[in-house]
Image: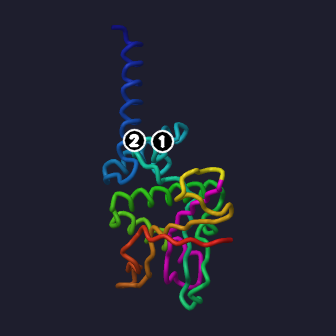
Amino acid sequence: MGPIKRIVLLALFIHVALCFLALSANLAPSELQRDLLWMTRSYLRPLNLELGFVPIELTHNYQQVEGPFRMRCQFDGQATDQWTDVDKYFQPRTEQLRFQRCCRELNALMLEERSDVATDWIIQIVHVINRATTRPVARVLLERELRFGRSEFNSPEFQLAANEEKVVVLFDAQVVEIDGEPSLIAISDDSRTSKSRTK
């Protein structure tokens, strides 16, 4: 085997190994996987295999990962019926896309009952918001919106009004400070509580 073939085989092996690493670490990577992906991010980014950017559908058989997802928050002293969309704190557009993918992965974590990992992610988001505002976040809410039209589904259970919107609450928690660090206290243990409202 000539040296060129060896180089090609080595490059192919490294490529396959990095792809396998990115896919195996898609939802909840270990510290070692996270470090390896961080070191190889310049190669994985053009392949769309960078940490946090791999589509969940490639590695998890979920039918409930479609959005749109919406995370909202309430600030300390804000009225209980007033909410602020969190995505406004993620600029530019590339950061908003990353945030939307983060919300989809949070949904997958909830489906896997990995609320411990999801809580860590949401606390990091709270840190980002707190750094950008003068008032601390008091409550966070992650929702998934489902929109149906009469012509889209024939099943009676999906015979909703054309403009009706079903909101599935995935995560609802109060933010409290413990030793100067934000912590989350779940307001409802039922992460799949749903409600309907009409625009």
State the image coordinates of residue 116 (x, y, percent, origin top left). 33, 66
Residue at screen point 40% across, 48% down: 26
Image quadrant in which you'd find residue 159: bottom right
Q: Residues within 10 Å of mark 1 (few under 14, many from 20)?
A: many
Q: Among all residues in the image, which is located at the extreme top?
A: 1
Q: Confirm whether residue 19 shows in the render.
A: yes
Marks 1 and 2, the one that precedes in the sequence:
2
Q: Is residue 199 above or below residue 77?
A: above
Q: Confirm whether residue 184 shows in the render.
A: no
Q: What amino acid is at disc 1?
A: Leu
State the image coordinates of residue 162 (x, y, percent, origin top left). 68, 60
Residue at screen point 47% across, 44% down: 41
Residue on which disc 2 sits: 23
- Cα separation, mark 1 vs mark 2, equals 8 Å
Stretch in magenta: 128-150
State the image coordinates of residue 66 (x, y, percent, origin top left). 53, 53
Q: How many numbered marks appear?
A: 2
For mark 1, give the secondary structure: loop
Q: Nearer the viewer, residue 60 or 126?
A: 60
Q: Nearer the viewer, residue 130 or 138?
A: 138
Q: Nearer the viewer, residue 2 or 109?
A: 109
Q: What amino acid is at disc 2?
A: Leu
Q: Quadrant of the C terminus?
A: bottom right
Q: Nearer the viewer, residue 25 or 31?
A: 25
Residue at screen point 64% across, 65% down: 164
What's the mark number on residue 163? none
State the image coordinates of residue 145 (x, y, percent, origin top left). 57, 63
Figure colour scheme = rainbow
What's the mark number on residue 49? 1
